[in-house]
Every structure is written in structure tokens, then in C-alpha cells.
Image (cartoon, helix red, strand yellow):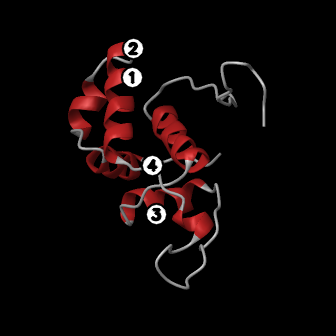
Amino acid sequence: MASLDDAMVDRYLERIDLDPAEIRAADRNIETLARLQRAHVTTVPFENLSIVGDPFGDATGEGVTLDVSALYSKIVERRRGGYCFELNGLFTALLEALGYDVHRAAAMVTPDDGEHT
């Protein structure tokens, strides 16, 4: 996965309403991680328009790439949202650039009976 440079990290932190200098000076601990995660999930919306297209028009979706530079352009520069793999992919790049050790894992939600449909 490509990485974010310092300027990109600062713009991303500003996109999620955090002060880059404050975050860079903070300890890499669970409190700072929780703050980053909360900021990300409350400012960057989940959306699937790139997949399904414009629901009120004839435009089809632009398609999806998981390339970090394309995700950065979409989510930070164009101030869009994304679907789970896009949002988590870019957030992973942010955390890695800030010095966190990140492990990605796939998961799914199942009903109470454990059956998949």
C-alpha cells in the first residue's frame, strides 16, 4: 500500500477536523487512536455512489479503486465519502503514516442465528 507524505497527513487530519500539530505531538496510545477513529467516522460519510451511481439521474458509478492516492483525492481533496474498503484503506494509510502498527482483518455481520444469506 502506498503511503501518505507529511503534507497529505496534515490535510487528512484537517479534513477530519483535527489539528495536525496537536495530533503529531500526542502520544501514540489508545486515547489518541480513539480520537482519530471518532473524528474519521463522524466526518467522513459512508457512501456507495461510486459503485451504484447517481440515484436521481442516469449517471453510472465511476468505479472504485483501492489505490491510496485515488482514495486520498476522493476523500480528502474532493471531500467525498466512500464504502468500507475505501474508508478503511485510507484510514490505514493515515495511521501508518502517524506511526501506528496496523493490522487489517476482514469481518462480516451475521444474524443472531449465525446463518449467512
Identify which residue, 24 or 114, lies in the foreground: 114
Identify which residue, 45 or 92, lies in the foreground: 45
Q: Quadrant of residue 27?
A: top left
On the rendered structure, is 34 left or right of 110?
left
Name the residue carrying label 2: 30
Residue flagged by tag 4: what amino acid is it? Answer: Asp
Residue visible at 39% across and 52% down in the picture:
8
Give the CA separation, mark 1 to mark 2.
Answer: 5 Å
Name the residue carrying label 4: 5
Residue visible at 54% across and 37% down in the picture:
92
Name the residue carrying label 1: 33
Is label 1 in contact with label 4 (beta carbons under 8 Å)?
no
Identify which residue, 99 or 57, lies in the foreground: 57
Q: x, y (%) of residue 42?
A: 32, 40
Residue flagged by tag 1: what amino acid is it? Answer: Leu
In the rendered image, the vertical position of residue 91 relative to residue 73, given as above or below: above
Residue flagged by tag 3: what amino acid is it? Answer: Ser
